[in-house]
Amino acid sequence: MVMDFSFEAQKTQQRLLSELDFSPLTSQQKTTFISRLETNFQPLFEQVFPLYQHCFDLHFHLKTLLQSFIDFQKKKRPAQIKDKSEFWFESNQNVGIAVYVDLLADDLSSLIDKIPYFESLGINYVHLMPLYLSPEGNSDGGYAISDYRTVSPNLGTNKDLKDLAAALHKKGIRMVLDFVFNHTSDEHRWAEAAKSGDKEYQEYYYFMGEQDAMEYNQTVREIFPQIRRGSFTYLPELDRHVWTTFNSFQWDLNYSNPAVFVAVVEEMLHLILNGCDVLRLDALAFVWKEKGTVCENLPKAHNLIKAFKACLDIAAPQVVFKSEAIVHPDEVNKYIGADECTLSYNPLMMALLWESLATRQTSLLYQSLERSFKIPAHTTWINYIRCHDDIGWLWDDALSDRLGIDGIGHRRFLNQFYTGQFEGSFAAGVPFQENPVNGDCRVCGTLASLAGVETAIAADDPLLLDHAIKRIRVLNGINFAMPGIPLLYQGDDLGVLNNNDYLNDPTKVDDSRWVHRKKLTNDDFALAEDISTPQGKIAQLIREMIQIRKANPLFAAQEFELVSLGSEHLFAFKRQQGDKTLVVIANMSEHLIPLERLPLGKSLSELMGQDTAINLLDKSLIDLPSLNLIEPLDVLWLIKA
Ligand code: GLC
Ligand code: GLC
């Protein structure tokens, strides 16, 4: 029998409504709540049903869930941001930065003093790296959470976080917090209860015997193979294996248990009470597991995330989700949509920009973006060049095959290239998590070090240095101009180089991502102020690009197309709004590249709609018919003169 979802949802909703305690709410709050429920209960029901239909106590869990929303409506949140526009993320005013509280400042209250710095840079979106209670020593940079409701004492108090949110909002800056919901630390109260033998809490995680763990391991990818082989950690006290996709102290939550879903939604509401505007869904590809599968990107992971989204829309509709899916491009895109994540990291473009700098070729970049860049209306890419994590070489191998590129060999080349093991490479990166069996590896390093600044300084070679800075310019010239929100990573705007201090810290030495997680000092800021230094030049070019982007509404244009300029070294695209046009041309090589006639016979003049253009980046006037060459590693932002 086919189920009539709308009828069943209505019936369940009515039953639940009659059982809920609305006494905490004013009648106005009650009306708002019921109207949100009217819109979002059925979507919620449609997602939880496939996940939990076999659970006899589902009604109980749904009731607990709805009651939590009611109680949540009563709680006070920090002052909200003034800009209430629904599609704020489409504006050209958006520029983001990701920062560690204690690496940019000392703690949450001293981070308030950095707001003028954000403002001077033009930032209006700040991702604060995880700041909750987590284990002493190694906590995977805070991604092992022991209590979602408590700020880590070395960063301050919950009140400090709320004060910071209010201070950011006052300046029109949105606050992004992590929602680390695939796992908790092994010190979370649920994990402690599980360790002490509490069966109810053991069911919050994946506890199993050796045989089961071995079976799962057959098909599951290893994320941190240098930490531990397989995806499980043995607990000798209990003689059980617990699922740990990442570090052994990060226990994966068992979402096949509806109690976990409800409990984690409640934690999510606590995060929202801190005043965040965006929740970053950490490691969301891993949240659903089934034996015999890769346990990544499973269809039910989408049911689960859609269920979270329906909860978000009931409780706090002004908050949006950002997806952190660093997986195959087709799978990345599946998390993006009105009923799932509004924002998503763009790991494909990130990886392929680096790929094209190494190869000096843009075909894989073009083909991949042609296939995967388009996402639904009113969803937005978070475009980035570097982040706090490693770079993984993710693209669709069917595309590289078609271009005659062997995926495995090409990834090996890129790893060698970016870790300085390739003759003539400009990059000074560090390998991350080399897999001893299949040779897989990823790359770490700051923007400046990977782009060649470190190597050029060591060689004391002005030409190499010039190229390195131009690489940073061309990467940013694309990143700031593509549709989406550009997201900087702390220190990259200051041209900070790799830092090896982590090698002396036993809690960090095994995780080379710390090479690009440096405590920013006054010296770093001072160097970036001095325009005679490479750091100063980098800081200046980034600031200028941000200013130009923010001053020009074309950077919010939704109409977008990739443009082929007939050279494998060039990358170009066009954005259009009404009769206004922006054409971006980038040369990924260190050579002068001639501009061929466009393949479809369109000239640059035709593309622009006239013969003269202004390059926004240097204000020069360009006669398009006589623009025949693109300078080495140059980038142009052309608009009609
Ligand atoms: C995400 C984070 C990464 C962390 C992992 C586990 O990928 O970005 O830093 O190690 O999730 O939480
Ligand atoms: C993420 C990714 C992986 C990344 C890691 C953090 O979830 O899937 O590629 O490197 O976690 O390092």
Image (cartoon, helix red, strand yellow):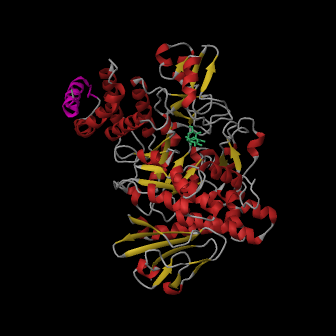
Question: Relative to 306, is 413 above or below?
Answer: below
Report the residue at 38% width, 55% height from top.
Answer: 82
> Visible in this render: residue 519?
no
Q: Is residue 143 magenta?
A: no
Q: Residue 628's quadrant in the figure?
A: bottom right
Name the residue furthest right. Answer: 459
Residue 632, image x, y percentages: 64, 74
Q: Nearer the viewer, residue 28 or 329?
A: 329
Report the residue at 63% width, 50% height from top.
Answer: 411
Residue 226, image x, y percentages: 69, 35
Residue 508, image x, y percentages: 71, 38
**Residue numbers of the magenta segment:** 2-23
> Visible in this render: residue 255?
yes
Image quarter hosting the N terminus? top left
Q: Residue 248's quadrant in the figure?
A: top right
Q: Is residue 494 left or right of residue 204?
A: right
Ligand 2 appears in which quadrant? Answer: top right
Which secondary structure class fits the magenta region best?
helix
Image quarter hosting the C terminus? bottom left
Q: Is residue 79 left or right of residue 96?
A: left
Question: Relative to 39, is 89 above or below?
Answer: below
